[in-house]
């Protein structure tokens, strides 16, 4: 999204006013903001067949299981975020943004405004915290790092061991070149042909014949939202760790990748929740 100079000046003025309002709000609070309440969770074994090997970078596992039924009650109205307050608070908690980051966040805010399945601010906060980490602060869908030779290990023909070739076939990579074709893409990267099909069917997009569509921000958002809400990636879902009154942001990392960088993402989520609570209108 490109802004004219006069639009940028007006936005800067709005942001400055919102920053002053936010700083006054923070200064008037004598005690630290309460930390999210931890929700006890039991340790369970991932559904079978378990992921053979996770090779996306950043790392995301997708477990091939039957799709769980959503248990959430769908809200009836969309929400709206005050952009000036959002970006002013972001600057306060995280620092400045480039125009490319602003554009990425603008698209995500619009998607969140219309996503009536994200029930609570904690859902939105954890989703943005995850994206911030997984996309290295770009807020844009990314492609898994590596050349064609790297992805040969996930190819049914080109993999260097029989075990890897069998694993590739078990995950739907049946044709030579599928290891590279179905490499990780998105906000939370999906891999393997079976997972491209499963998630594509879920959101109504042909990702098998057009896997590059997983890099479209709107489609990447739908993949992430559906996957995190329904436990597609590891069998764990947002409602396992968050409710209207509690959020276990550390253990919520199990939705994507065990506890890898769990504390970092938890701290992002705490700040994003404060930002959303200030910006929701």
Image (cartoon, grey):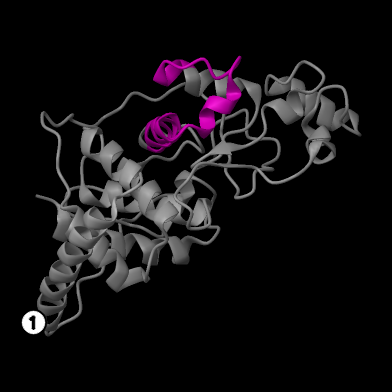
Residue at image coords 15%, 43%: 80
* Above or below, 184 relative to 94: above
Left or right of 251? Residue 107 is: left
Q: Residue at x 9, y 49 (%)?
A: 281
Left/right of residue 261 with respect to residue 151 in the rendered view? left
Query: Residue 215, how many percent across, how many down?
Result: 53, 34
Quadrant for the N terminus, please: top left
| Image position, residue 125 (x, y; %) | 30, 53
Magenta-colored segment: predominant secondary structure: helix
Residue 133 versus residue 103 in the image, above or below: below
Q: Is residue 223 magenta?
A: yes
Please tell me whether residue 67 belongs to the stretch shown in magenta: no
Q: Nearer the viewer, residue 103 or 234?
A: 103
Look at the numbered disc 1 and give the secondary structure of its residue: loop
Measured along the vertical axis of the image, is residue 272 above or below residue 191?
below
Q: Residue at x 55, y 20 (%)?
A: 207
Q: Is residue 1 above or below residue 73?
A: below
Q: What residue is pinned by disc 1?
A: 28
Task: Tell me where residue 116 appears, x and y as whole percent.
Answer: 21, 32
Residue 11's spot in the image, x, y percent? 21, 59
The boundaries of the magenta stretch are 201-228
Q: Quadrant of residue 79?
A: top left
- Answer with left or right where residue 243 lies relative to residue 202: left
């Amino acid at each position: 999204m490109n802004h004219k100079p006069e639009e940028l000046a007006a936005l800067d003025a709005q942001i400055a006013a919102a920053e002053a309002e936010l700083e006054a709000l923070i200064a008037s609070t004598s005690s630290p903001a309460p930390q999210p309440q931890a929700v006890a969770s039991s340790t369970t074994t991932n559904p079978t067949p378990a992921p053979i090997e996770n090779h996306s970078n950043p790392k995301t596992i997708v477990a091939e299981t039957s799709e769980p039924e959503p248990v959430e009650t769908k809200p009836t109205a969309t929400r709206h975020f005050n952009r000036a307050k959002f970006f002013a608070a972001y600057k306060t908690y995280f620092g400045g943004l480039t125009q490319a980051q602003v554009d990425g966040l603008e698209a995500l805010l619009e998607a969140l405004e219309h996503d009536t399945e994200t029930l609570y601010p904690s859902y939105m906060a954890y989703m943005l915290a995850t994206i911030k980490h997984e996309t290295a602060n770009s807020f844009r869908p990314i492609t898994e790092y590596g050349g064609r030779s790297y992805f040969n290990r996930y190819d049914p023909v080109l993999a260097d061991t029989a075990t890897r070739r069998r694993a590739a076939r078990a995950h739907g990579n049946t044709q030579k070149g599928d290891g590279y074709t179905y490499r990780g893409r998105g906000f939370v990267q999906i891999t393997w042909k079976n997972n491209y099909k499963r998630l594509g069917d879920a959101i109504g997009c042909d990702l098998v014949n057009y896997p590059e569509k997983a890099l479209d921000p709107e489609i990447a958002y739908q993949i992430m939202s559906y996957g995190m809400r329904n436990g597609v990636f590891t069998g764990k879902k947002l409602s396992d760790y968050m409710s209207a009154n509690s959020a276990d942001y550390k253990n919520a990392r199990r939705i994507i990748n065990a506890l890898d960088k769990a504390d970092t993402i938890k701290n992002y989520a705490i700040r994003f929740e404060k930002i959303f609570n200030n910006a929701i209108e």
